[in-house]
Image: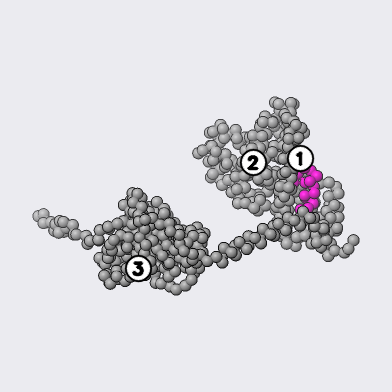
Amino acid sequence: MSCSRNQVDLSRCLDGRLPGTRRAEVMAHVDKCPKCNQVWEEMQTTQSLVFGLKQHQVTRSFRDDVWERIHSGEGSPEILLQEPITTLTKVRYGLIGAAAAAAFLFGVNLLTTDNSSPIENTRDPEVVELNRDTLDNETKDNTEKAPNAIESPVELVSGDLAAAAHLATQAIAKVASAANRLKIRKPVILRGKTDNQQLWQEVSQDVQTIDGGLHVLDSLQRNQLVRLEPISRACMEAARNTLKTYRFDQHLQSINLVRTLDECSLDGLAKVQVTFSLPQFQAPQGLLFGIIADDPVLRDILTQLEILRPQGGVLVLPPMIQFVPGAAQHNMILRIRPNMPPPQAKPKPVGAEKTLRKRPRKK
Amino acid sequence: MPHLPHTDTDALQTVAFNRVMAEHSSALKAFAARMLGDELAAEDTTQDAFLAYYRHIHEVPENAVRPWLFRVTRNLCLDQLRRRKFKLRLFRDMQRDDDFELVPADVKGTRPDEAAHTEEARAAIEKAIENLPPRFREAFLLCEVQGLSYEEASGIMGCPVKTVSTRLFRARQRFRTAVANIIKV
């Protein structure tokens, strides 16, 4: 037991605020530790000193004075209204009022400013730009090529951006809740596959964003997953699917692949940065998606659980979307594993028949 | 003097108010005096607190009068300290010359509780309390001196119970150090 921690408890012990068991522990420590023993004694002594302090008696006329002030109406609204206001006070309130008015006008101006101004050209030369039409065409092509391709986990719902932002906030809360549960259940998770599946079911009930992952895994098991090339197209598709998940895609103005961050591939996953813009979107302050992907502990768990979101040949962890308040463009980070090998049915272990062969009975 | 509606109080209310004054005025004044370090200002502040109580007498539950009065007094004291901050800074240098070392010569070798009875030792203790930072001082005064519970102090100070506990510990620590330097504990 550390002495500093013990001394904090000694203070509580002095006020009788320590539970019995803890008190016994602390006192046992005090008996052994000379330093804490001295502190304890000093505490008791100083308390006795404080008890000996003189009492401050009010003056004899205290009660009469209070009543006099009450009868004179001091502090009552009627009297306060009659009091003259000094020039300094007037000036002070005038300045405060002016500042408040200026702040209000500034706020109104900010709110009414059109955010759909042309996006500044700040992209890298390597940027692959895909506008909405191109993306639609690509999606169409992919659908034609692969009729059994993965479907979007969430249906498109028409609505305004405020509603979408509200949904996104709700999704964040759900993700956070699921993340907490994952953290709590970590020891259980690592036990076996059965637990994993059970957890999967629980999480998928809560998290809208992972719900699609279950569907994807199902498709993976049935060898229905379609690989798309090149990787940029797949990334775009994954990004668009994510935006669709959060119902932002109807307002999507443009989406750009900025770069692939290969240096961040310690776990075999690469990072891809994508920017996108939504017209007239008032981004909520500090809105950040992808809490799961950002947490290293949970990332490990997710990796072990194989909670990965393969979409079109790209293995995508729950992406991190960052809405920058007041900015025309927002960021999305996708964690991908390029060139993911197609899933194959596990071959039967050699010698399985041998193990099943009955042994001859000994006579 | 015009007849003011708020002076129309029934006899029961007057009696109740007088009882509250008799019960809490000394404790409130002691608290204010140690918060402000000024007896006269403390008396005025206590009167202000009772004035405020009179205006809200029907809104304050009977079992919560004490914490309510302490809360009002504490706020009034902090308000005064804030206003006096500039003046205090101005006069600090002048006051420094007047400070004297409070080391009673005759207390050496005597028991601390006996030493506390001497006037100088008392002054030293008061000085140690006065030198505590306001946040620690209010926790110390409410819990240690006035004997309020952590919960009541938490309500008065507007902070969690845990914070009260921590501030009280820190205050005790500093107070112990300050007092140990003056009186050999």
**Residue highlighted by disc 2:** B171
Could you tell me which quadrant the C terminus of chain A lies in? bottom left
Same subunit, labels 3 and 2: the answer reads no
Question: Please, which colouring scheme is shown?
Answer: one colour
Q: Nearer the viewer, mark 3 or mark 2?
A: 3
Indicate left or right for B116 with A182 as reference: right
Q: Amino acid at mark 1?
A: Lys
Where is residue A59 drawn, in percent x and y?
A: 83, 46
Badge 3, how many Cα within 10 Å: few under 14, some, many 20+? few
Cα–Cα span, label 1 and label 3? 85 Å
Residue at image x 60%, y 33%?
A38
Q: What chain is tagged by disc 2?
A: B
Q: Nearer the viewer, mark 1 or mark 3?
A: 3
Q: Nearer the viewer, mark 2 or mark 1?
A: 2
Determine the secondary structure under disc 3: helix
**Residue highlighted by disc 1:** A54
Residue B66 visible? The answer is no
Residue at image x 29%, y 66%?
A219
Where is residue A347 drawn, in percent x and y?
A: 19, 59
The disc label shown at residue B40, or none: none
The disc label shown at residue A134, or none: 3
Residue range of the region highlighted in magenta in the rendering: B32-49
